[in-house]
């Protein structure tokens, strides 16, 4: 019994020293994933594609909103001089347009958010693969990303990962973003 207590105490004392030694020898790194998700060529390309895709809808919504505002201004300005039938017709038209605008704006926001989430998921997968590749190739035991209170420049691998993303962007076929003429 005394022997098992002695062995337990020895193990309890030795375990923290072993753990500290293992951690001291571990190769650690840090990557700012948020920086990669904002500044990488892939993020810029995704942003440009989304801008190209959603600009026409946004412009149409803005034009429709301007027309609605003009109709409301006309009703406010000329409402007293319009016949009851014409004023009622304009009021109904305004109500219908507001309802349609609300639906279109909701649809636009939902579509934009879905596309943004799709593009973000693709980029996150690419970033995850880059981080794993760096970890394997350079024998890192642990790589932290975001949520880290402090990381010295010795362990910051963000620029290395950014360079890999730039290289991957060069290897990817030409962007599908068309220049506007």
Image (tube, rainbow, N blue to C red):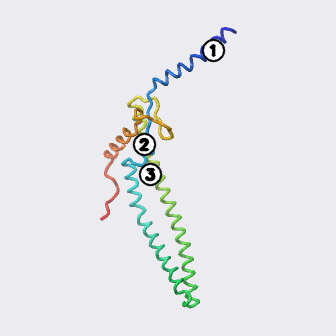
Compared to residue 105, the image places residue 131 above or below, namely above
Q: Earlier in the sequence, mark 3 or mark 1?
A: 1
Residue 67: give x, y in percent of width and height.
Answer: 47, 77
Q: Toward the viewer: 32 or 114? A: 32
| Direction right: furthest residue | 1
> How far apart in space, not on screen, are marks 3 and 2 (Cα)?
12 Å
- Nearer to us of marks 1 and 2 is 1
Disc 1 element: helix
Badge 2 density bin: few <14, some 14–19, many ≥20, Cα 10 Å:
many
Compared to residue 6, the image places residue 120 above or below, namely below
For image coordinates 31% across by 51% down, the residue present is 174
Q: Toward the viewer: 88 or 20? A: 20
- Nearer to us of marks 3 and 1 is 1
Disc 2 element: helix
Residue 124: give x, y in percent of width and height.
Answer: 45, 45
Mark 3 = which residue?
A: 119
Compared to residue 172, the image places residue 50 above or below, namely below
Image quadrant holding the N terminus, namely top right
Q: Are marks 3 and 2 in contact (CB under 8 Å)?
A: no
Compared to residue 106, the image places residue 130 above or below, namely above
For image coordinates 54% across by 80% down, the residue present is 93
Quadrant in the rendering for residue 54: bottom left
For image coordinates 41% across by 64% down, the residue present is 55
Image quadrant holding the C terminus, namely bottom left
47 with respect to 174 (left or right): right
161 with respect to 15 (left or right): left
| Direction left: furthest residue | 181
> How far apart in space, not on screen, are marks 3 and 1 (Cα)?
54 Å
- Give the numbered dot on residue 127: 2
Mark 1 = which residue?
A: 9
Q: Are marks 1 and 2 in contact (CB under 8 Å)?
A: no
Residue 49: give x, y in percent of width and height.
Answer: 39, 57
């Amino acid at each position: 019994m005394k022997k098992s207590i002695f062995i337990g105490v020895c193990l309890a004392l030795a375990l923290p020293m072993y753990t500290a030694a293992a951690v001291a020898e571990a190769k650690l790194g840090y990557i700012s994933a948020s920086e990669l998700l904002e500044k990488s060529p892939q993020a810029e390309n995704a942003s440009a594609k989304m801008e190209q895709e959603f600009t026409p809808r946004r412009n149409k919504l803005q034009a429709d909103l301007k027309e609605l505002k003009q109709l409301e201004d006309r009703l406010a300005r000329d409402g007293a001089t319009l016949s009851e039938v014409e004023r009622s017709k304009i009021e109904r038209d305004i109500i219908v347009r507001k309802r349609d605008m609300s639906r279109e704006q909701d649809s636009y926001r939902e579509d934009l958010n879905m596309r943004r989430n799709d593009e973000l998921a693709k980029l996150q997968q690419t970033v995850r693969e880059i981080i794993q590749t760096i970890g394997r190739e350079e024998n890192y035991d642990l790589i932290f990303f975001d949520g880290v209170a402090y990381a010295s420049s010795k362990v910051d691998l963000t620029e290395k990962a950014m360079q890999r993303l730039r290289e991957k962007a060069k290897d990817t076929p030409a962007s599908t973003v068309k220049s506007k003429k």
